Image (spheres, rainbow, N blue to C red):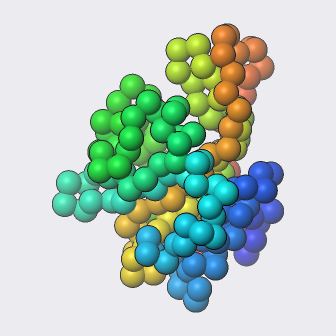
Amino acid sequence: MSLERFDHSIESPALRNVVRHWTEARGARRMPGWNDLKPTAIKEQLTIIWVWRFDSASRQFIGRLAGERIESVLGVSIRGARMSDVLARHDYAAALARHMRVMTEPALFRGHGLIFRHLDRFDMGERIILPLADDGEHGDGIIGATEFESNYGTPPKDVVRGAETESWFTLA
């Protein structure tokens, strides 16, 4: 099963806990909805979690929440903000494509390696992205979590070449 393979691919215990809660929250449904998630079940991971809802009228992802560590990287609060504005200085097109695929396929995403780079900062780590669906079937948002270590200066050449390695798992 893809979900089982996805879970086994994750190295971070914190990220695995987010996946396990997502799995429990969905119950017998294909995907959990925003209201199915229980912050107390993932309280230790809240600083590294980020959530976007998809507004079908504007075709935009709108921020629901981001933990302190995530907002420190972005430099702004995402709550109520359009992803296109929040990620304007970053690779918005790649993020949009990734998030849309997670939500519409639906798919499970794992990335690791160089997950963020801005000016003289480069963050190494692991990230996951999972779909959300209030009706349990049709994606209407995503939840992600990113565990990382921030580094400053010029990244080593092998880090730049390695960038973020992506793994995709179709949600059956």
Front in this rendered view, residue 143 or 4: 143
Q: Position of residue 65 (x, y in %)?
A: 43, 53
Among all residues in the image, which is located at the extreme left?
A: 57
Tell me which residue sits at (38%, 44%) in the image.
78
For this view, does 166 lie left or right of residue 31? Answer: right
Tell me which residue sits at (57%, 39%) in the image.
69
Query: Would you place residue 29 above or below residue 98 in this image?
Result: below
Tell me which residue sits at (52%, 48%) in the image.
67
Q: Position of residue 63 (x, y in %)?
A: 36, 51
Among all residues in the image, which is located at the extreme top?
A: 154
Residue 64 visible in rendering: yes
Front in this rendered view, residue 8 or 48: 48
Q: Position of residue 121 (x, y in %)?
A: 60, 19
For the N terminus, the image quarter is bottom right
Among all residues in the image, which is located at the extreme bottom?
A: 28
For this view, does 31 lie left or right of residue 146? Answer: left
- State the image quarter where residue 17 is shown: bottom right
Residue 163 visible in rendering: no
Tell me which residue sits at (59%, 86%) in the image.
27
